[in-house]
Image: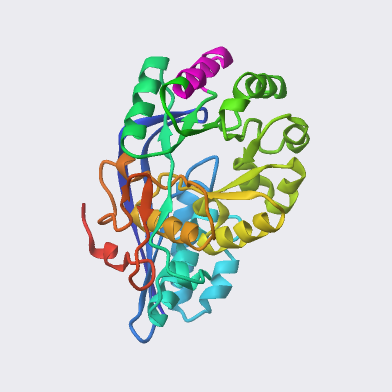
Amino acid sequence: MNAAIRPFSLPLSDPLETARGRIERREGFLLRVESEDETVGVGEAAPLPGWTEHYDECELALANAAETIERGDDAEAVLENLDGLPAARHALDLALADLRASRAGDPLYRHFGAASRVESVPVNATVGDADIEKTVEAAERAADAGFDCLKLKVGARPLSADIERVEAVADAVDADLRADANAAWSRQQAQQFLDAVGDRLAYVEQPLPATDIAGLAALSGTIAIDETVAEVGFEDALDANPDAVVLKPMALGGPRRAVEIAEEARDEGIVPVVTTTIDGAVARTAAVHVAAAIPDIPACGLATAKLLDSDLGPDIAPVADGRAVVPQGNGNGTADTWGYHA
């Protein structure tokens, strides 16, 4: 099997302010694998500090993986060696899944186990941190564009300001609302927020630091966990008693892991939601396939293409009226991104 990597750098259209800091661009690597029968699979690694390994670690891991595969080592064994390096592992996991689904003539979501054809999946709009007026304006634009589920970024402002922002949006638009604190609050702040506006939200995502399992379990209100899953693993995260779990394939080590955890979550009565880490077209499309493989999936955080000023290739899973199109071609449908230049 042949393997090669190449770097990319994608600036955001506008910097995204979150409780974890400012995101201005996404940098990473494409990984291309080709089997002896000339079937191609392409994966993407877009490391994000705080979620995955750092860029340099990812680059070294992928370079070593590609060299090892070129020598003839089993690619699945190489994949196991990437545990602890989720972005690099995501690239190889996706590339192998893309290759195998393409060889079988199946779209990736069918390869992941979907029993029937899925045309589209519901998605939410993300409203970044801003003052009340700009937050409401962004929410209204999203609602007018057909989104019936909005996720508000909170945690970067004083608690009282975020409460006012949620109340203002809830009064302004007719949509399901979620709030994402990115682990910004103390237990007292999180409970205060839930008491104030919890009844106006579908859930509050990651209100406490990822490892504060006891604190999450003690909160009164509907919560989702995100960072907790990536940092402590799904089995240990169950002790937080979440109502929903947010699955980022890039942070979990690959799309196949995301599908597996979604199935485990459903078995535990927990709602799975799939999101990207503002990825390029290759990983973003794969995340759409992951969502399509999960029956009755609620709105997912996949409407992120417009956050990028340039991309790895054409958007073959476009969003319209609050839904993302699920590609029906072979594999992930993004093999031609290897030679694409924005």
Q: Residue 188 occupies which quadrant of the picture?
A: top right
In the picture as drawn, the residue positioned furthest to the bottom comes out as 37
Establish if 136 lies above or below 263: above
Q: Residue 261's spot in the image, x, y percent?
A: 62, 58
Q: Main secondary structure of the magenta part?
A: helix
Q: Which residue is nearer to you in this view: 263 or 230?
A: 263
From where the camera sits, is residue 223 visible? Answer: yes
| Quadrant in which the N terminus is drawn | bottom left
Instruction: Please state the extent of the stretch shown in magenta in the rendering.
Output: 156-170
* Magenta-span inclusion, residue 310: no
Q: Is residue 105 left or right of residue 207?
A: left
Q: Is residue 126 left or right of residue 160?
A: left
Establish if 205 lies above or below 332: above
Q: Which residue is nearer to you in this view: 292 or 104?
A: 292
Q: Residue 53's spot in the image, x, y percent?
A: 53, 48
From where the camera sits, is residue 157 visible? Answer: no
Q: Residue 213's spot in the image, x, y percent?
A: 74, 38
Establish if 24 lies above or below 36: above
Q: Which residue is nearer to you in this view: 138 or 209?
A: 138
Q: Residue 183's spot in the image, x, y percent?
A: 61, 31
* Magenta-span inclusion, residue 169: yes
Q: Residue 29 occupies which quadrant of the picture?
A: bottom left
- Which residue is at a point 31% across and 47% down the rendered structure image? 320
- Which residue is at a point 54% across and 44% down the rendered structure image? 51
Q: How is the image coloured?
A: rainbow
